[in-house]
Image (spheres, grey):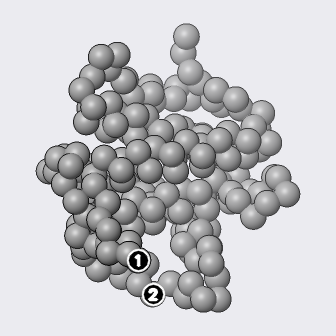
């Protein structure tokens, strides 16, 4: 069955091996959900990406921007120990607890998906270069480290939750339900 919207063929969803090792399973499910979020934006106009058709401030653009930040936060800052990217470091979290989402709304489609794609590429690279038991450079408030396995599971959970939001938003925009 061809998956189309507005006469355009959607990219296929990434495949997931049926009997993978643990690392492959975690990485493939994470890639599946990354693609699912992007798919919810497929074929939409700039205005539709920013639409908030439900009684919430969430839009698809805000969700994509949030997940770009989450990728960067977990893989670059926490796991890798690097400083936040300049655009993140400049956000005023005290006056806007959703500053990354607010910023994402101001970006055009090309920039939004460029930031997202770069964040995902960096995350994939860091995850591929590490073992599941490798520990984060940064720690939680108690001084405990996260291992890569925990971070991958957390990212799957984060995407799954937000893909549910994206499904509802997309259906409210144009009735598309995959």
50 vs 54, left or right, is left
154 vs 167, left or right, is left
Image location of residue 40, percent across then percent down: 60, 40
Number of residues whose C-alpha sits closer than 10 Å to that of mark 2, classed few (under 14), some (14–19) or many (20 or more): few
| The quadrant where residue 59 appears | bottom right
2 vs 166, left or right, is left
Between residues 60 and 17, which one lies in front from this camera angle? 17
Residue 49 in the image: above or below residue 96: above
Question: Between tags 2 and 1, which lies in front?
Answer: 1
Image location of residue 122, percent across then percent down: 27, 58
Residue at image position (40%, 40%) is: 30
Q: Earlier in the sequence, mark 2 or mark 1?
A: 2
Residue at image position (27%, 22%) is: 20
In which quadrant will I find the N terminus? top right
Residue at image position (28%, 52%) is: 148
Residue at image position (70%, 52%) is: 48
Image location of residue 22, percent across then percent down: 27, 31
In which quadrant will I find the C terminus? top right
Q: Is residue 151 visible to the viewer in this orientation of the structure? A: yes
Residue topped by disc 2:
90
Image location of residue 163, percent across then percent down: 59, 43
Residue topped by disc 1:
141
Between residues 99 and 148, which one lies in front from this camera angle? 148
Q: Kindly identify which numbered label has been placed on residue 151.
A: none
Number of marks drawn: 2
Measured Cα–Cα span from mark 2 to mark 1: 23 Å
The residue at the far front in this view is: 142
Number of residues whose C-alpha sits closer than 10 Å to that of mark 1, classed few (under 14), some (14–19) or many (20 or more): few
| The quadrant where residue 87 appears | bottom left
SS of the residue at dot 2?
A: loop
């Amino acid at each position: 069955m061809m998956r189309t919207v507005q006469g355009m063929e959607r990219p296929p969803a990434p495949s997931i091996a049926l009997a993978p090792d643990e690392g492959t399973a975690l990485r493939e499910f994470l890639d599946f959900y990354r693609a699912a979020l992007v798919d919810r934006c497929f074929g939409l106009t700039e205005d539709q990406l920013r639409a908030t058709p439900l009684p919430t401030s969430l839009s698809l653009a805000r969700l994509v921007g949030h997940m770009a930040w989450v990728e960067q936060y977990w893989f670059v800052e926490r796991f890798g120990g690097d400083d936040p990217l300049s655009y993140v470091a400049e956000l005023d979290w005290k006056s806007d607890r959703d500053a990354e989402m607010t910023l994402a709304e101001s970006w055009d489609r090309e920039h939004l998906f460029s930031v997202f794609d770069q964040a995902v590429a960096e995350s994939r690279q860091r995850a591929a270069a590490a073992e599941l038991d490798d520990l984060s450079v940064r720690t939680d408030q108690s001084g405990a480290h996260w291992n890569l396995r925990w971070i991958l599971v957390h990212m799957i959970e984060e995407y799954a939750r937000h893909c549910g939001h994206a499904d509802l938003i997309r259906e409210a925009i144009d009735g598309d339900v995959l």
